[in-house]
């Protein structure tokens, strides 16, 4: 038996059977490892004053292709709830008997359904455990329920490529375990403290000191106008939006920042507003962004594009997207900044913020081309790939201002300002219960917006990820209530044209919105007070979050200036002593 202890933590490892018990002395809780330590792998447990460090030691054994870190613990004699940073955050109460089927869900970094932060937490009756992966470049997560009802979440570290060797573990892998009180807020703040310690946190105030234009984010409407060029008077429609009461708007996209404009979506050319139109929109006080799509390109047969493609280990290029008959292949990240800077001197020079396609979403990949100048004769590693993405985002901010990208990924929280993809706040029919986990950590540093096509008035995109959650657009009451509670900006597509997949093969279709549409008017009406709320609390730290009813429908957030916001996500009126009467799918301020 190995024993380590200090005033707050005790570690017991049984050498005979590989069992591990961690004791939180402050709260009197034992946490038992689900399963045993693998004797064939070398782990070290290092006891610090307030955390346990667990390290997998890379021995050079090339037969090891993945390692399950000792991360799946259960509180002894206690109930167990998980906090996962999927989308805006999810609570999973394993005692909920509504969902009992076994499942196995493998999640990577970011994407629409991956982990937005490299952590998870477990809440017991009297205390909580927060697991943080300190090594993120090859980090994955496995969430599982067995047929006997037992549950676990594992941090899985996978092999990657060095500059000379294909698919090895390559370096030591490290995780940290902290103990905390059994609350969502406390677990989130524990992770936030660690991010700050690592120097990977910048407040909006700090960002604005360097880039004052970031201050224009607060109180703005996320104003998506579609990928496709429409046959409307854009300027006149924006004048209507300004007259409606929206003083600020983050308008996107007004152009496509990509390698060619010679493609169509739903049979229509990409949006490309004139210099005069862009100037007129800016004169209204609105900010404009392109659709910066430089991670993929159509193969035009030319030397320039083919020389930038990311290569698979077998040398082939990687097909990642297709619109009708237009096929797109990955570009190596080492080329993106150079192309971006060239565009900023010409067609993109008048942009006042920037939105990137999936650079923070489908992120952190290798390139096995041997003829790229940045990694001549060897593969580009995932670690290097991440640094190129960070450089690209910083380059955009320095040349434009605020930066947005698809997917909320805190690996880039210093380098960009708006990440996307959220699930609907629904609590009666789904296993995972949405919570503002990302905003408890990053509300005073980043905005967590909707995926660009998940506007309050757009029902054309969505997904039912049963039994876990649903996401999509077109639920303006539900979405606006959530944005108000979280202190985030509203999102409406007030006019414009967009394409989507029909569900039939690779067939696509075009849809349009007009300012006077009934759906648009409903969305704008409910969005306006949400925008004003964001102007009030958007820069502040979210200091608290609570469920106030057992069915999860009544929730409260608190912000650093003392502002409290209540939200009712249910279908019935709530009369609660803390807030009084609250209508279905609505929100209100609390009394200070």
Image (spheres, helix red, strand yellow):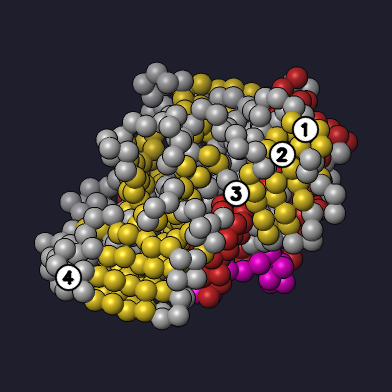
Toward which corner of the image does residue 543 lie, by quadrant?
A: bottom right
Q: Which quadrant holds the C terminus?
A: bottom right
Q: Is residue 202 part of the magenta span, yes or no?
A: yes
Give neighbour class at mark 3: few <14, some 14-19, many 20+ (Cα, 10 Å): many
Picture residue at 57% right of the left edge, 61% below the top: 186
Give neighbour class at mark 2: few <14, some 14-19, many 20+ (Cα, 10 Å): many
Q: 113 or 47, which is in the foreground? A: 47
Q: Secondary structure at mark 3?
A: loop
The first of marks 3 and 2 along the sequence is 3
Residue under numbered circle 2: 567
Q: Secondary structure at mark 1?
A: strand
The residue range painted magenta reads: 198-210
Q: Is residue 142 part of the magenta span, yes or no?
A: no
The first of marks 4 and 3 along the sequence is 4
Closer to viewer: mark 1 or mark 2: 1
Where residue 103 sits in the image (x, y, percent)?
Answer: 31, 36
- Which disc, if any, is residue 375? none
Give neighbour class at mark 4: few <14, some 14-19, many 20+ (Cα, 10 Å): few
Picture residue at 14% right of the left edge, 67% below the top: 16
- Which disc, if any, is residue 575? 1
The first of marks 1 and 2 along the sequence is 2
Where residue 102 sits in the image (x, y, percent)?
Answer: 31, 34
Residue under numbered circle 4: 15
Residue under numbered circle 3: 436
């Amino acid at each position: 038996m190995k024993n380590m202890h200090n005033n707050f933590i005790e570690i017991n490892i049984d050498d005979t059977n590989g069992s591990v018990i961690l004791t939180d002395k402050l709260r009197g809780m034992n946490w038992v490892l689900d399963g045993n330590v693998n004797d064939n792998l070398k782990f070290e447990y290092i006891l610090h004053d307030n955390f346990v460090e667990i390290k997998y030691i890379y021995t050079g054994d090339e037969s090891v292709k993945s390692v399950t870190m000792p991360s799946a613990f259960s509180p002894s004699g206690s109930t167990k709830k998980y906090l996962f940073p999927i989308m805006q955050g999810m609570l999973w109460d394993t005692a909920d008997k509504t969902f009992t089927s076994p499942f196995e869900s493998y999640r990577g970094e970011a994407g629409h359904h991956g982990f937005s932060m490299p952590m998870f937490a477990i809440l017991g009756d009297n205390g909580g455990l927060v697991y943080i992966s300190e090594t993120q470049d090859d980090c994955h997560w496995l969430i599982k329920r067995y047929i006997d009802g037992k549950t676990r979440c594992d941090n899985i570290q996978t092999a990657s490529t060095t500059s000379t060797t294909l698919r090895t573990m390559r370096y030591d892998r490290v995780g940290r375990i902290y103990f905390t009180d059994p609350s969502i807020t406390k677990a989130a703040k524990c992770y936030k403290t660690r991010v700050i310690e690592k120097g990977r946190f910048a407040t909006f105030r700090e960002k604005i000191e360097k880039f004052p234009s970031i201050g224009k984010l607060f109180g703005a409407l996320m104003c998506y106008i579609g990928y496709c060029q429409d046959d409307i008077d854009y300027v006149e429609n924006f004048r209507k939006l300004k007259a409606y009461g929206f003083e600020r708007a983050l308008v996107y996209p007004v152009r496509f920042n990509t390698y060619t404009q010679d493609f169509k979506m739903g049979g229509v050319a990409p949006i490309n507003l004139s210099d005069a139109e862009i100037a007129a929109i800016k004169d209204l006080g609105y900010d404009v962004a392109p659709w910066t799509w430089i991670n993929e390109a159509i193969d035009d047969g030319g030397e320039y594009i083919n020389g930038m493609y990311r290569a698979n280990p077998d040398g082939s290029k990687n097909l990642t997207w297709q619109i009708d008959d237009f096929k797109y292949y990955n570009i190596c990240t080492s080329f993106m900044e150079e192309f971006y800077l060239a565009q900023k001197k010409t067609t993109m020079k008048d942009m006042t913020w920037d939105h990137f396609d999936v650079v923070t979403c489908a992120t952190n990949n290798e390139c096995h081309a041997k003829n790229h100048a940045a990694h001549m004769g060897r593969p580009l590693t995932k670690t290097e790939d991440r640094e190129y993405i960070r450089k690209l985002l910083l380059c955009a901010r320095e040349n434009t201002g605020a930066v947005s990208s698809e997917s909320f990924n805190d690996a880039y929280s210093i380098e960009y300002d708006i990440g996307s993809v959220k699930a609907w706040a629904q609590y009666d029919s789904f296993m995972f219960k949405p919570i503002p986990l990302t905003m408890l950590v990053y509300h005073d540093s980043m905005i967590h917006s909707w995926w660009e096509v998940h506007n309050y008035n757009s029902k054309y995109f969505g997904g039912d990820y049963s039994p876990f959650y649903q996401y999509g657009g077109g639920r303006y009451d539900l979405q606006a209530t959530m944005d108000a509670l979280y202190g985030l900006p509203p999102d409406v597509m007030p006019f414009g044209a967009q394409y989507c997949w029909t569900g039939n093969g690779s067939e696509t279709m075009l849809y349009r919105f007009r300012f006077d549409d009934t759906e648009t008017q409903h969305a704008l009406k409910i969005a306006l007070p949400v925008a004003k709320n964001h102007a009030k609390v958007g820069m502040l730290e979210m200091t608290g979050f609570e469920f106030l009813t057992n069915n999860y429908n009544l929730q409260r957030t608190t912000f650093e200036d003392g502002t409290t916001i209540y939200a009712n996500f249910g279908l019935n009126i709530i009369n609660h002593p803390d807030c009084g009467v609250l209508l279905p799918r609505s929100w209100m301020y609390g009394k200070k």
